[in-house]
Image (cartoon, helix red, strand yellow):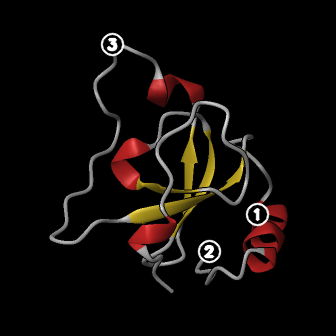
Amino acid sequence: MTANPSNATPPVRDAGAGNIFAFEAISAPGAYICNWSGHLLRVPEDAVLRGRSPVLEIRAKEPLYVTKLSEDPFVTVTKARMIASDLDQQVNF
């Protein structure tokens, strides 16, 4: 399931679970689900510190969106699956 770009929200530092972001707009640590594939992304605090080079970059022709599952980047896989399911996201992890 892919997100509709009209559902995307601008990056907000304290945005909680369920918010949809463009991949490149991730600005807070946490666990995210890729809306295009269902894969789990774990974004530790070190990955979003100012002045750091991006730890990961993904390029695509179309915008790629992620949905935040948890503020804890190391949430258990079982809990991440349950949250994603509650948000009606396709799980592929």
Residue under the point 50% across and 61% down: 66
Which residue position holds label 1? 80
Q: Check if mark 2's residue and mark 1's residue have beta carbons within 8 Å.
A: yes
Seen at 83% across and 72% down, the residue is 82
Residue nearest the observer in this picture, 16 or 10: 10
Element type at mark 2: loop
Q: Residue furthest front?
A: 6
Outermost left residue: 61
10 Å crowding of disc 3: few (<14), some (14-19), many (20+):
few
Residue 91, horizontal then vertical, whole percent: 63, 80
Q: Is residue 86 left or right of residue 41?
A: right
Task: Give the amino acid type for the residue marked by disc 1 in the picture.
Answer: Ala
Quadrant for the C terminus in the image = bottom right
Sequence-wise first label, 3 or 2 = 3
The secondary element bearing badge 3 is classed as loop
Find the distance from the CA under tag 3 to the CA under tag 1: 29 Å
Q: In the drawing, what numbered circle is on residue 93?
A: 2
To which quarter of the image does residue 85 belong?
Answer: bottom right
Q: Nearer the viewer, residue 55 or 23?
A: 23
Give the image location of residue 76, x and y in percent.
Answer: 80, 56
Residue that appears at 35% across and 35% down = 55
Disc 3 and disc 2: Cα gap in Å?
31 Å
What's the amino acid at mark 2?
A: Phe
Q: Name above or below for residue 28 compared with residue 35.
A: above
Q: Quadrant of residue 59?
A: bottom left
- In this view, 25 is above or below 64: above
Q: Which residue is mark 3?
A: 51
Residue at the spot x=64%, y=79% of the render?
Answer: 89
